[in-house]
Amino acid sequence: MAEEKSNQNNVPKKQEQDDNKTTVRYTLLGGAVGAGVGLLASPEVFTRISKSEVTRAAGREIRRTAQDFITEQAMAALRQNTSSYFSKYTENLIGRANGSPDETEETEGSAAKFQEQYDELKDENKNLNEKLQGIEEKLDALLKAAENSK
């Protein structure tokens, strides 16, 4: 019984120590983040960063990554829609071979639905590309303005 009481007393102390360590870690992390934000808020540091070739390369890489990601997402959606369309079409062909006339109408409806989804996806991709182009132009203008200001 005496051992159980001593173990119970040790548990809250250990938990309190862990909480104190966590608090200290969060405090240090907050200080580091605050110092970083303070440095970036300085006009001199911001100007140096904006003129840096590393920053420009990072911007180009982010743009490429975003474009690749959007392209991959669009292709995945297209593949999924295409495969489901072909599986439905195959099922309809098998059904027609067995003699059910109603499935011809369903095939035409699913083809129209697929075309509609494809057109929507195509429009969405076009809009996203236009937005990315606009962002790229604004970033270029920002970099040129930063270069001209110095």
Image (cartoon, rainbow, N blue to C red):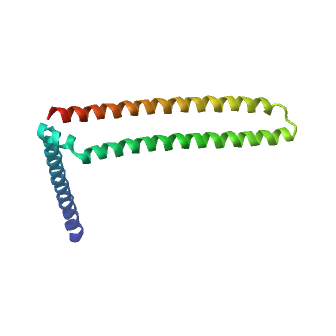
The quarter in which the N terminus is drawn is bottom left
Identify the residue shown where x is 24% and y is 68%: 4
Q: Is residue 15 above or below residue 90?
A: below
Identify the residue shown where x is 18% and y is 32%: 148
Residue 116 picture quarter: top right
User: Which residue is outermost to the front?
Assistant: 148
Pick the residue in front: 139 or 121.
Answer: 139
Pick the residue in front: 41 or 35.
Answer: 41
Q: Is residue 1 above or below residue 50?
A: below
Residue 94 picture quarter: top right
Place of residue 115 in the rendered image (x, y in percent of width and height, measured from the top left)? 64, 30
Place of residue 78 in the rendered image (x, y in percent of width and height, measured from the top left)? 58, 40
The quarter in which the C terminus is drawn is top left
Place of residue 96 in the rendered image (x, y in percent of width and height, measured from the top left)? 84, 38
How many numbered dots are placed on residues in this image?
0
Side (left or right) of 128 relative to 139:
right
Residue 63 picture quarter: top left
Identify the residue shown where x is 16% and y is 45%: 36
Q: Is residue 1 above or below residue 55?
A: below
Identify the residue shown where x is 74% and y is 39%: 89
Side (left or right) of 18 relative to 78:
left
Place of residue 119 in the rendered image (x, y in percent of width and height, measured from the top left)? 58, 29
Pick the residue in front: 105 or 7.
Answer: 105
